Amino acid sequence: MENCTEDLIIRPEKSFKPSINFSNLLGNSHFAENLEPIISSLRESQYWPLSKLEQIREERFRNLSHDIRSSKFWSEYFKKYAISTSSSEVSEELLKFPVINRNDFRNWGKNVFIYQKDLNIFKTITSGTSGTPLEIILDKKTASIAYFSFFFRNPIFEKIDLGILNRKFIVSLGNHGLRRWFRDFIYLFSISPSDLEKKEVRQKIYKQFEKIPDGMLGGFASVVLKFAEYAADEKIKFPGLSAIKISSEGIGLNDRTFIEKTFGAPVLNELNCSEAGMIGFECPENLGKFHLNAERIIMEIVGENNEALGKNKEGKIIITALDRIAMPIIRYEIGDRGKLLSEICRCGRTLPLFEFTGRQNNSLIFSDGKKIRSIIIQSALIKSGLAKKCNFIQLKQLNPYDFQFTIIPSPLYSKEDETKIRVILTNLTENRKIKIDFEYKNISDLKNNKPSFFVPLQ
Ligand SMILES: [Zn+2]
């Protein structure tokens, strides 16, 4: 029985048909039936001794090395760094790989992609923190299985019945990250916070919740928060709602508590990225700390020169994803900072604990060393009502005291708003003497690019 469990974790894709991909999962009983035993196995393995998890990772790493060596690029890469795929010291072999980042992938271009004939490829573009796009590819089948099995392994879903996969079960306020994976399972409301002022919009949303008694709420933090305020005022109840998934812009503890109380469901907090998939989940008994999905992810923390850092030391997060075949992710800098903790979690899970402190390139940095997270500026602008006055707003730090806003104004925007923005930024930078410039653009200047709110000092 035990071998069977391990095998499901090492080769989860084996029991699924090749056609599985994230656009044919709704009502797909073959998918749900085969997913269930994998989720059960992962619920067991989160309590296994680390040595056993280590064996699983070694075997998966050997399988991965074997599979990707068929590509010209990767076989040369293995040769260049003298990596052996048959060595029994897998962790030592892994350290021979150089640490890589987005720029490496950009330089390598399509050479790095592996198009085996049994892979069903999905292409996507991630904009990342600097707003510079990166093309990534995924194998639809393995990526869907990994996403769904680790999503539902989360302790929040311990009692969930996978029967929900037979119908739409997510109400999403705004078109955010959940859509890539849960596309057919979502009732999407493409709205901004100001749309919620209309009673008929709110009532339409409340009605959808009646159809998904054990479903989920997803959305942008600003919209979900606004929706919670109305729902609390109007005393709307959401019995049975299982979780709330908020986009990565994040919320403070007070807002989180308010949202959880209003909807009667926990906020689901995970770390994931398009390149590597599900990395870890917040422990419900140890809020703010995350368990690593160690069955599929190896996490390292390194310093500025990519030197290994010990436990409890903050540095760059480096990820190896053991099930990414079409675009191998080996010792990849995901752009977040964090630390691995030596603490043994009180919940009893043996999966390593870590904290992440957010995007490393996500702060305004001054020459006196002071850092201000850009999310703080963004939230203040949203709170002051600028969200509906601008179709697009971006802040760029040009040098330590020089900032530029790029704005695509809506008809509601006026010259006074410029003064308002100046005051907000000046206050939040604690009255440092800063220069703020404004640049106005048209919507057509954006095209396919999806730039982020903040562009850090380069
Ligand atoms: Zn825990």
Image (cartoon, rainbow, N blue to C red):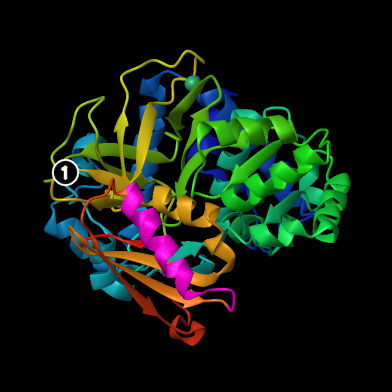
Tell whether position 30 is magenta.
no
In the depicted structure, whether residue 93 falls above or below residue 107: above
Magenta part mainly helix, strand or loop?
A: helix
In the depicted structure, whether residue 113 falls above or below residue 162: below
Q: Quadrant of the C terminus?
A: bottom left
Label 1 crowd bin: few (<14), some (14–19), many (20+), radius 10 Å: few
Please tell me which residue is depicted at 47% across the width and 62% down the height of the picture: 138
The answer to whether residue 314 is left or right of residue 49 is left
Pick whichever, 152 or 389, lies toward us: 389
Report helix, strand or loop for mark 1.
Answer: loop
Pick whichever, 209 or 228, lies toward us: 228
* Residue 267 in sight in this render: yes
In the depicted structure, whether residue 381 falls above or below residue 300: below
Please tell me which residue is depicted at 30% across the width and 32% down the height of the picture: 339
* Residue 20 in sight in this render: no
Q: Quadrant of the N terminus?
A: top right
What are the residue bounds of the magenta stretch?
A: 411-428
Pick whichever, 319 or 80, lies toward us: 319
Please tell me which residue is depicted at 23% across the width and 59% down the height of the picture: 434
The answer to whether residue 370 is left or right of residue 249 is left
Tell whether position 422 is magenta.
yes
Tell me the amino acid under the disc marked 1: Gly
Q: Position of residue 192 (x, y in %)?
A: 65, 61
